[in-house]
Amino acid sequence: MLRTSGTRLLDARDLAEVRALIDRDPVADVFVASRLDACGLDAWRLGAEVWGYGERGRLESLCYSGANLVPVQASSDAVRAFAERARRQGRRCSSIVGSALAVHELWQLLMPHWGWARDVRGQQPLMAIDNDPAVEPDLQVRLVEPHEVDLLLPACVAMFTEEVGVSPLAGDGGALYRARVAELIAQGRAWARIQDGAVLFKAEIGAATAQVCQVQGVWVHPSLRGRSLGTAGTAAVVAQARASVAPVVSLYVNDYNIAARRAYEKVGFREVGVFASVLF
């Protein structure tokens, strides 16, 4: 039996404390920080709630509850409180993601109530780089232009389906996913190497603050894998993102994806933490 929740819904009065908490680990908590930069703590604008553990003026931990359930700086006591609130609310998220220890504790408490998860990725090295890449960037990797959204989209769909295990086109036929890809392009956060009308390499920046940005969706055309295209392409993204988005570039990767981990290490990424993801 989970204990009674000791959480509260955070609002604008808590914003300074929330930011101070997130600033303890700006790389690990870049997703939540980026959402707060865009929308503050207003649940309607955010499309999510942010729960706090600890009284106002003594905030200890928080949890972002939206399409993703994301514990932040969460102690074991805080995890138990967040799990109780999430249990009472019912599952609304498509994933639990964040620091591995907190995610594992949270899922162990919620699993008896939420049931089956499609996949549990228990060890995902969190990596970051704050200097120039250690390998030569692919000079043909460039920002994708708005009119190229439908050229990039099939590669994004292929990457998402391969990585997550389900197609992003399900449900609404892909309208929402296409809109998200178009948004990243418009924001100058989508890069690709395009040759003869084909996408050979691509990657995007998802979450970003003034300090840190997070690479997502790294993909190489299947016929070209094993030729270091991903390594040079990622180096190009790092160099350009550090110049135009944020000085620190991060990502997280499945521990069993040895080829990707070696490629990121060659670029100059170093491990700075461990994430875990529970996918529904």
Image (cartoon, rainbow, N blue to C red):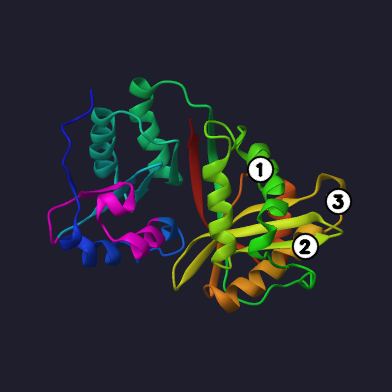
50 above or below 1?
below
Residue 105 on image: x %, y % = 37, 36
Task: Kindly indicate whether the residue at mark 2 contacts the one at mark 3 (C-beta within 8 angstroms).
Answer: no
Rounded to the nearest whole Å, what is the CA distance between mark 3 and mark 1?
18 Å
Residue placed under numbered mark 2 in the picture: 193
Between disc 2 and disc 1, whose residue precedes? 1
Q: Which amino acid type corresponds to the residue marked 1 in the rendered image?
A: Val
Label drawn at residue 224: 3
The span shown in magenta is: 32-57
Residue at the extreme front: 147
Q: Is residue 49 magenta?
A: yes
250 above or below 6?
below
Which of 22 and 204 lies nearest the eye of the viewer?
Answer: 204
144 sits to left or right of 33:
right
265 above or below 163?
below
Residue placed under numbered mark 1 in the picture: 157
Rounded to the nearest whole Å, what is the CA distance between mark 2 and mark 1?
16 Å
Residue 133 on image: x %, y % = 69, 73
